[in-house]
Image (cartoon, rainbow, N blue to C red):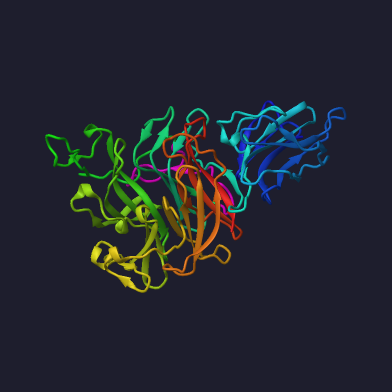
Amino acid sequence: MALNARVRVAALSSLVLIVTAGCDGWSGPPSAVGGTTATLSAQTRCLAQSTTNPCTYWFQYWADGATTVTSTPQRAANVNTNGFVTVTEAITGLTPGTLYHSQFCGFGDDNVAAPGLCVGQQGGAVSSPGAQPDTGDYNSTQRFRTADAGTAATVDLGRPLSTADTADRPISRDAGFSAAYSGSNALWIFGDTVHRNGSPPWLLGTTAAAGAYTRGSVPTTLQELPTPPAAPTPGRTGIAQFLPPPQGLLLPGIPTAQNPNPPPVACTPEAGSSYPASWTSGMTRIPGTERLLIVYHQICVATTRDSWPVERVTLTDYDPATNRFLSTVTPFTASPLQNGVPAGQQLGSPVFGGDGFLYFYAHDFATARVLAARVSATPSTWGNAANYGWWNGTTWTGTPATATTVIIGAPEIWSAHVMDFTGVGTHRLAMIVQTTFGTGGYRVYEATSPQGPWTAGPSGRVPDTCPGGGFGCYAFTAHAELSTADRFWLSWYSPGDRNGFAHLRLAAIPW
């Protein structure tokens, strides 16, 4: 009916498909999640091979940290059909604002004996009914957080994966941006990446993968990209550096009693717990092409210091077909370099406005502001800082210090990311703001024009306990090509996933 101890797991969208000799099925993400209710779902099939072991299914669920597992009533599956049948079960009595786990369980046919087996998400561990699976494998259950008075429910949808990410060679992926460059394919750029049992085993900066996307589904067959300008080739089994590592970055010297004004030091691993990195701050499709504009920050990551200066801001025109950077400009460079560029110049989230301008956004944590900037959409203007203007609440000014925030009422802004959602229902521009440090809180804002007004939409908290890692959950990013008219898709860095090996995870919230 549903599961088999001799499992063969195959990806099917964001679900797990367990193929057996007689019965099979998979668990899907819950729907209609409210404060105290949810609808659990799965698809199942039964070939009615055994009269003494009929196909039987149910769901089990529990609140995170609870020791008691609740099971829904056992029900008979549809029989004598080769087609899959969707089965659902409404549950009640949930606690608002709480992280829950659920699984689809069953037995039946010739090969799944009672008491049966249970499955969660794609690639997750199989477990026994009544027992909780390995809590470190976030794919072993469906995970969702119920709504409360101030937040909407958020449902975990799984990990975006490349074909190089396998059970014996898993990949840990940091922050992830994605953007469609055609009607069927998208590029993903990740932050620092670790490939267990891979070669190389880790890379600081960025790695990238590309592949087909389907709106409303988690991509699980992305292809790793080689370092540009090497041509993209399918079936790569390892990771590779994507954006070029910065050269010549500096750190402020550390004052001492003997030398209160020390000279800057080079940003290198040899300089003491620091390394130069090119970190993506957003990308978008260049209108009328199948190329992408990628914006990235050249940062000295100083792991033993509180400040990681953004020393340069760079824009590059990238061609996915050839895996080449066609042109690159750096409009903003700090002076002195080790001090970093001002917050207003730390631009990201590029959006072509369709009005002759290219827009950007920057967040200023110190003042809880999100700032909007623009430049002519003509590429020849992008490399000159003097061509940029910032929104001051009334007009566009060449002085970033006079810029005013485009969103109101956010007490904290740890990050902000904007994408163009034109074509996704009636949505136009949407922004996700990380509103709490470490614990996974966020809010979605929407606007019809780049400068706003921006209207506060649903807020939520990711279905994650956000343990460890020093920063908890972070890197909140919007994904326009995956979102639907009624579900906003987001990703975040989950430090506890894969038993602390960590990975990027996707979720959706109603909007």
Q: Is residue 294 left or right of residue 28?
A: left
Q: Of 156 and 261, which appears nearest the observer?
A: 261
- Residue at the (83%, 35%) spot, across then down: 48
Query: Which residues make up the magenta segment?
Result: 214-236
Q: Residue furthest front?
A: 257
Q: Percent from the top left, x then y, of residue 330?
A: 26, 56
Residue 216 magenta-highlighted: yes
Q: Is residue 146 above or below residue 348?
A: above
Q: Percent from the top left, x then y, of residue 352?
A: 40, 65
How many numbered callouts? 0
Quarter of image, res 306: top left
Q: Of 52 and 36, which appears nearest the observer?
A: 36
Q: Residue furthest right?
A: 51
Residue 333 visible somewhere in the drawing: yes
Image quarter where the N terminus lies is top right
Residue 111 visible somewhere in the drawing: no
Residue 272 magenta-highlighted: no
Quarter of image, res 403: bottom left
Q: Residue furthest left?
A: 258
Q: Is residue 451 above or below residue 109?
A: below
- Residue at the (28%, 63%) spot, across then down: 401
- Residue at the (59%, 61%) spot, across then down: 485
Q: Percent from the top left, x then y, of residue 423?
A: 54, 65
Q: Of 1 and 140, which appears nearest the observer?
A: 140
- Residue at the (38%, 30%) spot, across then down: 201
Image quarter where the C terminus lies is bottom right
Instruction: Look at the magenta stretch and give its main secondary structure.
Output: loop
Q: Is residue 13 left or right of residue 266?
A: right
Quarter of image, res 360: bottom left
Q: Percent from the top left, x then y, of residue 81?
A: 80, 42
